[in-house]
Image (tube, rainbow, N blue to C red):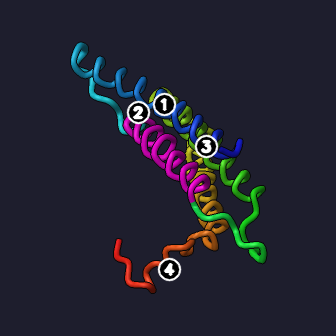
Amino acid sequence: MHSLVRRYLKTAILYLGIGLVIGGWMIVERELNGVYASPYVVSAHTHAILVGFIMMMILGVALWLFPRPEKSDVRYQPRVAETAYWLLALGTGARIIAELFRVLSASILLRWIVILSSFAQIAGIGLFFYTMWSRIRPAGSQKREEQGERF
């Protein structure tokens, strides 16, 4: 397993832990203190789980399992997949932190961090699929299908 794949997967697990902690805090606040989570805390929790964990896990597994790029492939570049990782990992982290602090402050700086980190997430996911697009192809299964094999 390539080091970038491991980084995607381990970061996903880290974000799962963060999401579970935020979720645990939300349930304690609701059940013991009667305080429902603000939309900012819900957003932080959602982004930790859905983007930080699920999306990072999907991207890491895709990077690992998709067929290798063909020799003539100029679209796939490992450094682009790495750039996508950093945009997504740092964008998600910044968004979670900024959303949690938005509960305490309406600062314009925090608002811009939320906005810019959101665009970093979007750019990271878009960049990843741009560079992986050419790797979404048959790798042996096309020949088996042509011979009549059904999956």
Q: Nearer the viewer, residue 53 or 138?
A: 138
Q: Which residues are magenta?
A: 42-65
The question of residue 10 being in magenta is answered with: no
In percent of width and height, residue 79 lies at 78, 56
- Judged from the image, the secondary structure of the residue bearing numbered disc 1 is helix
Where does residue 93 sit, x and y in percent of width and height? Answer: 59, 37
Is the residue marked by circle 3 packed among few (<14), some (14-19), or many (20+) residues within 10 Å? many
Amino acid type indicated by mark 1? Leu
The residue that disc 1 covers is 100
Residue furthest top as drawn: 32
Q: Which residue is mark 3?
A: 8
Spatial CA span between label 4 and label 1:
48 Å
* Rendered residue at 77%/73% (across/down): 71
Answer whether labels 2 and 1 touch (C-beta < 8 Å). Answer: yes
Q: Secondary structure at mark 3?
A: helix
Q: In this image, 28 relative to 56: left or right?
A: left
